Amino acid sequence: MKYYAVIVAGGSGSRMQNKIAKQFLLLDGKPVLMHTMEAFAACALNPEILLVLNIHQHQYWEELCKAHSFTIPHQLIKGGEQRFHSVKNGLKAIKGKGIVAIHDAVRPLVSPELISRSFEAAEAEGNAVAGIQPTDSVRKINFDGKTEALNRNELLLIQTPQTFNIDLLRKAYQQPFRNEFTDDASVAEYSGFTINIIEGARDNIKITYPEDLEMASFLKKKSS
Ligand SMILES: Nc1ccn([C@@H]2O[C@H](COP(=O)(O)OP(=O)(O)OP(=O)(O)O)[C@@H](O)[C@H]2O)c(=O)n1
Ligand SMILES: C[C@](O)(CO)[C@H](O)COP(=O)(O)O
């Protein structure tokens, strides 16, 4: 079986409010994106890595790789307007059959163990989407602005990797973009596929706001 990893890094990181896109910010002296790619390179299934990056950042990325002596093999793909389009561009670059993991570049603490588990579960079930249970109480905001309690035991916080049989995901990504397509599971589900959840990891955080980078540094040190 052939394994692929599409690392989506085509965003601008606006919520990070930094002139440098968050995927390039330093985490323990190394760009966030490099930590993420190292986790996939350490996966025993040896996935082929495709990095999806805004075309205007390709040269900057190549300079960063030289500066950090970063030599993990990968194919560079141009990003798209939305995450959806970036994933679609990544899929277009994969020929033939196999299993593909889609992963946010800004989830650098993903473990090779979770990556392998995701590939293995997707190979068995058709797809595998990482999720964890909320530990806070949760409420829904109604159209009138009032809120109502939800049963948190019926909810999941969804992460990446989100891993699929490539043929399944290619079919799903033939649909036109919809605003509710915030991840690959929502795209696959809208296309009629049932989503298979696997246990994610509490430290598999997405770096979105400045404090997330500080948290990631703490978690990285704790796990080393
Ligand atoms: N057009 C886009 C938008 C997002 N992403 C990627 O999707 C992942 C999750 O997106 P998010 O955390 O929202 O990143 P940004 O869109 O960069 O952040 P923001 O919404 O704060 O601008 C990130 O690795 C981001 O680089 C992408 O590949 N292409
Ligand atoms: C894909 C994702 O990380 C799953 O939780 C999330 O949907 C990405 O959302 P973002 O707004 O693009 O960061």
Image (spheres, rainbow, N blue to C red):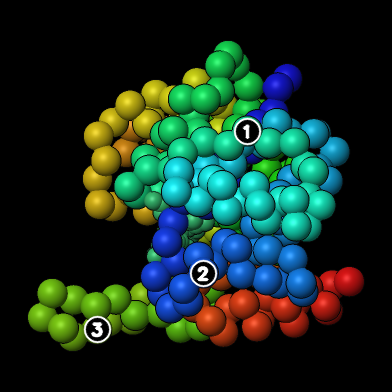
Determine if the C-beta at disc 2 is less than 8 A from ligand 1.
no
Residue type for callout 3: Thr
Residue type for callout 2: Ile
How many labels sit on residues? 3
User: To which residue does mark 1 refer?
Assistant: 75
* Earlier-in-chain disc, 1 versus 3: 1
Left or right: 113 as drawn, with respect to 136: right
* SS state under label 3: strand
Camera-side mark, 3 or 2: 2
Determine if the C-beta at disc 3 is less than 8 A from ligand 2.
no
Q: Are marks 3 and 2 in contact (CB under 8 Å)?
A: no
Q: Position of residue 210 (x, y in %)?
A: 53, 81
Residue type for callout 1: Gln
Q: Residue at x 54, y 45 (%)?
A: 58
Above or below 207: residue 1: above
Camera-side mark, 2 or 1: 2
Q: Residue at x 70, y 31 (%)?
A: 48
Left or right: 6 as drawn, with respect to 187: right
Q: Are marks 1 and 3 in contact (CB under 8 Å)?
A: no
* Earlier-in-chain disc, 3 versus 2: 2
Camera-side mark, 1 or 3: 1
User: To which residue does mark 3 refer?
Assistant: 147
Residue 173 visible in rendering: yes
Left or right: 202 as drawn, with respect to 127: right
* SS state under label 2: loop
Q: Residues within 10 Å of mark 3 (few under 14, many from 20)?
A: few
Q: Position of residue 131 (x, y in %)?
A: 57, 58
User: To which residue does mark 2 refer?
Assistant: 20
Real-space CA distance between mark 1 and mark 3, rounded to the nearest whole angstrom: 46 Å
